[in-house]
Image: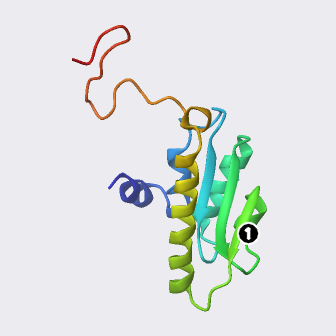
Amino acid sequence: VNLTANSNDFSYGESFSRHLPPLLGRAGYCGIAFSCSGSSPNIVEFLRLMREYGQNTIGIFGTRKNKAMDFCDAVIAVDAPSAAIGEDIHSVVLHMLAQGLKDEDSTKIAPKPPKRLFGASTPQEGQSAA
């Protein structure tokens, strides 16, 4: 709902990048964009802003050259006969990336989780979770 509301109130071109400022400037984040065309203004702006703040970026696109590729450190180009099949392949790539991250030592690749998440209290340091 927040994504749709922000898009309606501001612009669809900022629909993803508008949520980034709290993350920008922190080391270790990587922006990953999936798009068959790579020409959607919201995808291009998301990747541009990530790069502006020195974050790594990965693009998973169709095979034709697109504007979003200019803002990517790495690109996976999917040669598919249709957008529908391309999106299915993107889904497989996403699962492969997720599996690769799960197989890594998560303390090296992920930021520490917050002490409170969605209003649920967690034990403070030094307290037991009993």
Rendered residue at 58%/38% (across/down): 105
Rendered residue at 60%/38% (across/down): 109
Q: In this figure, which colouring scheme has been used for the structure?
A: rainbow
Please, which residue is most extreme toward the left here?
Answer: 130
Q: Position of residue 56 (x, y in %)?
A: 71, 47
Rendered residue at 50%/29% (across/down): 112
Q: Position of residue 82 (x, y in %)?
A: 57, 90
Callout 1 amino acid: Lys
Rendered residue at 68%/83% (across/down): 79
Give the vertical position of 11 relative to 27 (above or below): below
**Residue occupied by mark 1:** 67
Residue 4 left/right relative to 66: left
Residue 107 visible in the picture: yes
Q: Position of residue 121 (x, y in %)?
A: 26, 24
Q: Position of residue 124 (x, y in %)?
A: 33, 13
Residue 38 visible in the picture: no
Q: Secondary structure at mark 1?
A: helix
Residue 14 left/right relative to 123: right
